[in-house]
Image (cartoon, helix red, strand yellow):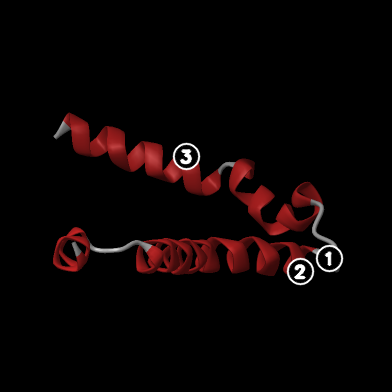
């Protein structure tokens, strides 16, 4: 019972405190400019395409190798 009262009072304090109002003015703290969407796009672009580029390089590298079974048949 004490724990429930403590949690309820803590939740009420969090909801009433002025700290929650800072989220309304978060653009000022984050320094969002017109270039921000482009920075996010470029970051996500490389984040998404880096594994694809890596897999293409590894596939190409392994495709150039010869199989040991093929080398034994030629000898």
Residue 64 location, quadrant: bottom left
The x and y percentages for residue 16 are 54, 46
Q: Kindly check if marks 1 and 2 are in contact, taking CB atoms under 8 A apart as contact.
A: yes
In the picture of the structure, the residue carrying the numbered disc 2 is 38
Residue occupying the point 36% across, 38% down = 9
Q: CA distance from mark 1 to mark 3?
A: 37 Å
User: What secondary structure is found at the residue carrying circle 2?
Assistant: helix
Residue 1 location, quadrant: top left
Q: CA distance from mark 1 to mark 2?
A: 5 Å
Q: Earlier in the sequence, mark 2 or mark 3?
A: 3
Judge left or right: residue 44 versus residue 39.
left
Looking at the picture, tell me which residue is in the foreground, 12 or 48. 48
Looking at the picture, tell me which residue is in the foreground, 67 or 72. 72
Q: Residue 71 got which mark?
A: none
User: Which is more foreground, mark 1 or mark 3?
Assistant: 1
Q: In which quadrant of the rendered image does the C terminus lie?
A: bottom left
The x and y percentages for residue 11 are 39, 44
Q: Earlier in the sequence, mark 1 or mark 3?
A: 3
User: What secondary structure is found at the residue carrying circle 3?
Assistant: helix
In the picture of the structure, the residue carrying the numbered disc 1 is 35
Image vertical order of residue 15 relative to residue 56, above or below = above
Q: Residue 13 got which mark?
A: 3
Q: CA distance from mark 2 to mark 3?
A: 38 Å
Residue occupying the point 57% across, 41% down = 17
Residue 63 location, quadrant: bottom left
Judge left or right: residue 48 versus residue 7.
right
User: What secondary structure is found at the residue carrying circle 1?
Assistant: loop
The x and y percentages for residue 42 are 69, 65
């Amino acid at each position: 019972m004490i724990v429930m009262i403590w949690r309820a009072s803590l939740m009420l304090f969090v909801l009433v405190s002025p700290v929650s109002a800072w989220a309304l003015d978060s653009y000022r703290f984050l320094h969002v400019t017109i270039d921000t969407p482009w920075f996010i796009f470029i970051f996500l672009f490389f984040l998404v395409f880096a594994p694809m580029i890596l897999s293409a390089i590894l596939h190409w590298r392994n495709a150039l190798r010869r199989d040991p079974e093929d080398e034994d048949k030629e000898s």
